[in-house]
Amino acid sequence: MSERLGDYGSVRHWAIQSLFESLEDYSEGTVIVDAGARIVWINARYADRFGFADPNAVIGRPVEEVIPNSQMREVVTTGRPMLLDIMQTRQGTLVVTRLPLKDDQGRLVGAIGFALFDEIQTMSPLLAKFARLNEELAATRESLAQARRAKYTFDSFIGSSEAALALKRQAERAAQMDSSLLLLGETGTGKEVLAHAIHAASRRAHKPLVTINMAAIPETLLEAEFFGVAAGAYTGADRKGRVGKFQLADGGTLFLDEIGDLPPALQAKLLRVLQDKEFEALGSNKVLQSDVRIIAATSVKLAEKVERGEFRADLFYRLNVLAIELPPLRERLSDLAELCEALLDELAGSSAAGRYRLSHAALARLADYDWPGNVRELRNILERAIMLADTTLLDADDVAPLLGPARPPRGEPVVASSHQAAMAQFETQLLREALAACDGHVPSAAARLGIGRATLYKKLAALGIAPR
Ligand SMILES: Nc1ncnc2c1ncn2[C@@H]1O[C@H](COP(=O)(O)OP(=O)(O)OP(=O)(O)O)[C@@H](O)[C@H]1O
């Protein structure tokens, strides 16, 4: 027997015969039509289902006269099988398969159809799983879309000083335009808040707002983040491919935070995309298009970087079509009271303690400080003051210790064997204190220390200090 199984011709013959017999036996019905879709043969079970007690009575008739919704004509016309289909009949729903029939020369001579089963419920576990997966997909898409909607509007941008009002007027005008926009301002001045508000007030509001933070993503991963990765281009996590942020933001706004940290190679690529509105995913040569409005932000002086040759002038001019400068907090101290009120309410949330307020003296003390970390630093300080305070009325004593240069380190004296080791020890303490004062936020700590954030990141890595 096993010898005969080695004979492909016989095996094929049996396979065809068994396949036909099994389907014929177990299915709800079988029908064969000729090239003109006329019935050549139908089994008794199937003929009976459509009201014909004698199968011979239907031979030679167009298939649709017997099986009203039959698609067999389509199969003999196109020569293509319909492997799985659902057919509604007056006698119920059938799951069917239809295959073309060819002669020895491969010519299409007709088609064969099997009604696999009539209890569509047989498929219900599969259909239920499919429906559940579809629901999950819809929910995931919805939550992603929600995450990509603007979190802030112009009302979220607190301030009614002349500087703040002028800024909001400028931003409202920028929201009506579609050209690239550059937001300039020290760390924590509200560039991200403003970018969200501008998107929310623009004609793109119903489309996504997608953010890429150049300072937070390692250089090696940035390109994939921007343009995506084609499926199969890499092994590992990106094996299935990944959609880039340019594509995710299609129709909406792409917010490029800390654009000054964009590495030179990517500056060139970004420029090309802004010019041509076309790009390719990594590992693919399919050209993709995306209609996005770019809002870029920087807390470093980008024009100076251009002068030093660290940022491409052509990209700078492309991004700088419109520019808005956000004033530092120390230049709009008349907004301090309003900001504190809003931030304290936000921080207290629905806490049982109720509303926190600042005494006049506390406000005066806050106004005395120069706020290198701007509104973010103010928020952090108020948050800590709330945690430490005994009452809901915060006084100067509650905020003063949290402000200003960090206290000198207590404990270990500097004992080091060499000048180099002593300097490293000193620097470690200095950086740790600056980070602690800024809640681990590297850009604020850099501003506080008066050094660039990239420099600070490098020093932290060299000294083995984790930001948080
Ligand atoms: N005008 C404002 N009104 C209310 N909250 C503000 C305002 N400006 C900033 N904030 C708050 O300060 C924090 C920092 O703001 P944001 O992230 O927008 O600053 P940024 O300028 O983008 O900072 P960075 O350059 O460090 O990224 C946020 O918690 C934000 O809610």
Image (cartoon, helix red, strand yellow):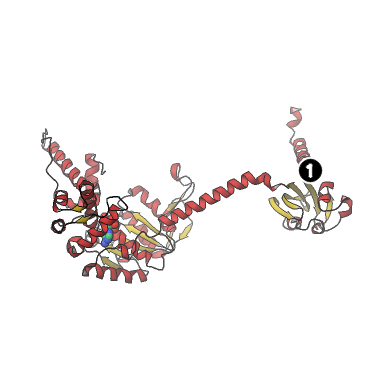
**300 over 17 or under it: above or below:** below
On the image, numbered disc 1 is attached to which residue? 24
The residue that appears at 77% across and 38% down in the rendered structure is 18
Q: Nearer the viewer, residue 88 or 464?
A: 88
Report whether residue 260 is seen. no
**446 over 466 or under it: above or below:** below
* x and y percentages locating residue 295 in the rendered image: 34, 62
Q: For label 1, count other residues whose C-alpha is less than 10 Å away and answer few (under 14), some (14-19) or many (20+).
A: some
* x and y percentages locating residue 207 in the rendered image: 43, 62
> Count the marks: how many?
1
| Ligand 1 quadrant in view | bottom left
Is residue 191 shown left or right of residue 423?
right
The residue that appears at 76% across and 50% down in the rendered structure is 113
* x and y percentages locating residue 412 in the rendered image: 12, 35
Report whether residue 289 is seen. yes
Q: Answer with the quarter of the image where residue 315 lies.
A: bottom left
User: Which quadrant of the rendered structure holds the N terminus?
Assistant: top right
Is residue 279 shown left or right of residue 98?
left
